[in-house]
Image (tube, helix red, strand yellow):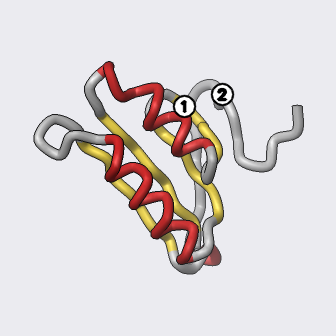
Amino acid sequence: MYVIMAYDVNVERVVKVLHTGRRYLTWVQNSVLEGELTPALFERLKADIAKIIDPNQDAVRFYVIKRTACFEKEFLGHSKNEPGQIL
């Protein structure tokens, strides 16, 4: 499955959420990460993020695309980072 994670969290937890998300996904722009995950890794990511955030203040959204054959990305402007990009 392909997962896009977008977050809006208190500044005190931004770094922790970003670092946790980067263990599973690729950072593509401010507060957005994406990449391929197995269902087990997706559950682990959600559990790790849930331990960090304050549900009364923070928001994290996961967009799950189960069949990448139906998935297409379009960009406007500069792309900061792409999954699979080799530096």
**Residue 68: x and y, percent?**
61, 73
Whether residue 81 sits left or right of residue 17 in the image: it is right
Whether residue 30 sits left or right of residue 85 in the image: it is left
The residue positioned 40% from the left and 27% from the top of the image is: 14
For the residue pair 48 and 59, the one nearer the viewer reads as 48
**Relative to 42, is 4 above or below?**
above
For the residue pair 70 and 52, the one nearer the viewer reads as 52
In the image, which disc is placed on residue 10? none
Name the quadrant of the C terminus: top right
Residue on which the image places disc 1: 29
**Relative to 87, is 70 above or below?**
below
The residue positioned 65% from the left and 28% from the top of the image is: 80
Residue located farthest toward the front when viewing the structure as drawn: 51
**Residue 34: x and y, percent?**
57, 51
At label 1, the amino acid type is: Gln
Whether residue 20 sits left or right of residue 8 in the image: it is right
At label 2, the amino acid type is: Lys
Distance Cα–Cα, label 2 vs label 1: 6 Å
Residue located farthest toward the right when viewing the structure as drawn: 87
Residue located farthest toward the top when viewing the structure as drawn: 11
Pointer 2 local density, CA inside 10 Å: few below 14, some 14–19, many at least 20: few
Give the quarter of the image for residue 40.
bottom right
Name the quadrant of the N terminus: bottom right
Q: Quick check: marks 2 and 1 in contact, CB under 8 Å?
A: yes
Residue on which the image places disc 2: 80
Whether residue 61 sits left or right of residue 80 in the image: it is left
Residue located farthest toward the left when viewing the structure as drawn: 56
Helix, strand or loop under label 1: strand
